[in-house]
Image (cartoon, helix red, strand yellow):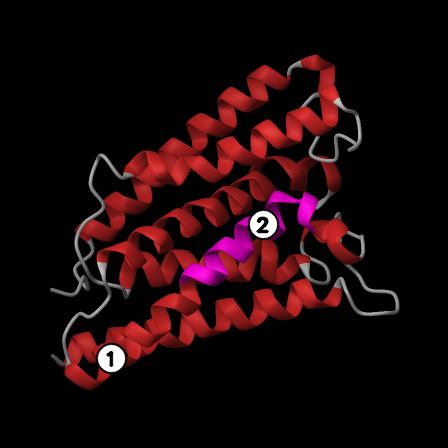
Amino acid sequence: MKDIKTNNIVSMVLNSLIFGLTFGSILTYFLPGPHKAGNMDVSGTGNFIFFTNDSNILAAIASILTVPFNIKGIVSGKNEIPHWARVLKFVGTTAVTLTLTVVLLFLGIIYGYPKMFEGVCLPLHLLCPLMAIISFCFFEGGEEISKKELPLAVVPTLVYGVVYLACVIVFKVWQDFYAFNVGGFWYISFAVLTGVTCLLAFLLSLVASRNFLRQQ
C-alpha cells in the first residue's frame, strides 16, 4: 500500500507538471511580444501546425485526466487509474516520445540542438516527453496495454502525417518545416515514422508491463 501511495504521489506531481508546462508553453504563442521558440517561432493558432505542440497537448490532456485518479489512489492506497485513462496516457506518451526521438535523431542534426531546446522548445521537446515516459512506465499501475490496443498509439502519427503531406505536397499551404519531403521522398519518411511509432509503442508498453514498481 505504501508503494502504491508513493507511486501515485510521484505520478500526480509529474502529470501536473506536464499539464502546467504544456499549457504555459502553448499560452506564450498567444501573448504579445517576442518569444524564443526555436524552430517553432510562430504566433497564435499557427503553433498548432507542429506535431510537437499537438502531441504535447494530447499528453497534457491525458495527464490532467489522470490526476483525480492519482488523488483517489493516494487516499485509498489502491490502484484507481481506470483502463481508459491508462490507454489515453499511453497514446499521448507514445506521441511525445516520437517527438523526442525525431528531435534527437533528426531535427537536432539538421537544425542544431541548441535551437531544438531554446524557449518553449525545452519543455515541449524534452522535459514533458521525459516526464510522460517516466510517469507512464514507472509510476502508474493498471491493466497492461493489450496487443489489440497497441495500434491506437499510431493514430496521432497517421492523422498528422496525412494532414502534413496534404498541406505540404497537395495544397502547398505549409512549408516542409520538418524536411520530410526532401528529394520527394515523402513516402519513405511516412513509412519510417509510422514504423518508429509502432516500435516506440511496443517498447513503452513492454517497459511498463515489466517494471517492478508496477502497481497491482
Q: CA separation, marks 1 and 2?
A: 29 Å
Q: Is residue 51 above or below residue 12?
A: above
Residue, x 72% and y 14% (percent of image)?
183
Lateral position of residue 3 relative to residue 102, left or right: left
Lateral position of residue 121 relative to residue 87, left or right: right
Q: Is residue 184 above or below residue 153?
A: above
Q: Nearer the viewer, residue 155 or 103?
A: 155
From the top left corner, tell me how far across and down residue 162 is, in percent: 58, 27
Image disc number at residue 54: 2
From the top left corner, tell me how far across and down residue 37 is, in percent: 76, 57
Find out whether the residues at labels 1 and 2 contact each other: C-beta distance under 8 Å. Answer: no
Characterize the local packing of mark 2: few (<14), some (14-19) or many (20 or more) Cα atoms within 10 angstroms: many
Magenta: main secondary structure: helix
Label 1 sits on residue: 72
Residue, x 60% and y 57% (percent of image)?
124
Magenta segment? 48-62
Q: Which element type, helix, strand or loop, lies under badge 2?
A: helix
Q: Assess whether residue 58 is covered by the magenta stretch.
A: yes
Residue, x 69% and y 62% (percent of image)?
120
Image disc number at residue 36: none
